[in-house]
Amino acid sequence: MTAVLALAASLLWGLADFGGGSLTRRLPALTVVVASQLTAAVALVVAVLATGGLAEASPALWYAVAAGVVGPFAMLAFYRALALGPMGVVSPLATVGVVVPVGVGLLLGERPGPVQFAGIAVAVLGVALAGGPQRGGPAAAGRVLALTVGAAFGFGAVMVLIAESSADGGLLLALTVQRVCNIMIGGAALVLTYRRLPGGRPAADLAVARRHLLPLTAVGLADVAANGAYAAAAHSGSAAVAAVLASLYPVVTALMARGLLKERLLRVQVVGAGLALAGTLLLAAG
């Protein structure tokens, strides 16, 4: 059951990444983040109320609030990178954010084994290769790489904060608080952004968002379902096995980009993306 749930999480995260990246090529990244997270928050609020999850509230939820502050910026950078660069490179690179929880473990006195040290080295090499030449020249490549690495470390920070917020249970409530904060922070940023734009732009974006309401909802729900499947996998068996299998989601995104968008990558980028994913798997397995 652990393997089935973890692979389901991987599939759902891959679908959400592809959907979010595709939508960002039609809508501003911030609009995609806020709209998709709104649907996720609604689903989570309903689930918490239905299961009596409010009874699990504790001061640890402040970690979920922090995750909700960091999350929108990480997602904004990630979706922007997916829109600007090849998905087959961006998605695997984003998995290197797992070095954040590993680094926190080091600060708390944990010592990674040889496999994890190897994973760090392989992942760093993969980042360097995958960020190599691509359409748009060095400047475009550098921007995509910066956005992706920034998003990766943001996702890693969110992993740590959510783990702390649900250490004594209440994962569903922690995820709900995180998503609500995502909407508050992202929504405020969206309002400030639109105030600086011509009057017709918000209305035009809203019209486009309405036309894409179904895929926006699907992205948000897929993300929530993936979180739930991963949490269930980690609690039903080996957390290490769950982490390794759930880390395969970039494969889904890359295959969809290749099959649906006919995305072509340079050989060095393929090698780099593969090394970044391999390094992530080594870190999770170690």
Image (spheres, rainbow, N blue to C red):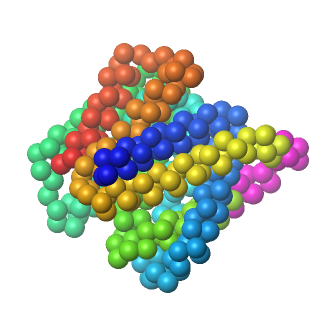
Residue 194 is covered by the magenta coloring: yes
Answer left or right for 6 relative to 226.
left
Stretch of the chain drawn in magenta? 188-204
Res 130 visible: yes
| Nearest to the observer: residue 226 or residue 203 | 226
Residue at the limit of the structure toward the right, as seen here: 199
**Residue 267, percent across and down?**
36, 15
Q: Residue at x 56, y 55 (%)?
A: 72
Residue 14 is covered by the magenta coloring: no
Answer left or right for 165 relative to 72.
left
Q: Residue at x 49, y 21 (%)?
A: 258
Residue at the limit of the structure toward the front, as seen here: 1
Residue 270: which quarter of the image? top left
| Nearest to the observer: residue 264 or residue 211 | 211
* Picture layout, residue 45 above or below residue 2: below
Residue 213: which quarter of the image? top right
Q: Residue at x 51, y 28 (%)?
A: 256
Answer left or right for 114 relative to 223.
left
| Nearest to the observer: residue 19 or residue 60 | 19
Q: Main secondary structure of the magenta part?
A: helix
| Nearest to the observer: residue 282 or residue 146 | 282
**Residue 158, percent across and down?**
43, 59
Q: Residue at x 38, y 22 (%)?
A: 269
Res 205 visible: no
Residue 260: which quarter of the image? top right
Count of picture labels? 0
**Residue 14, percent across and down?**
47, 39
**Residue 223, percent across and down?**
52, 51
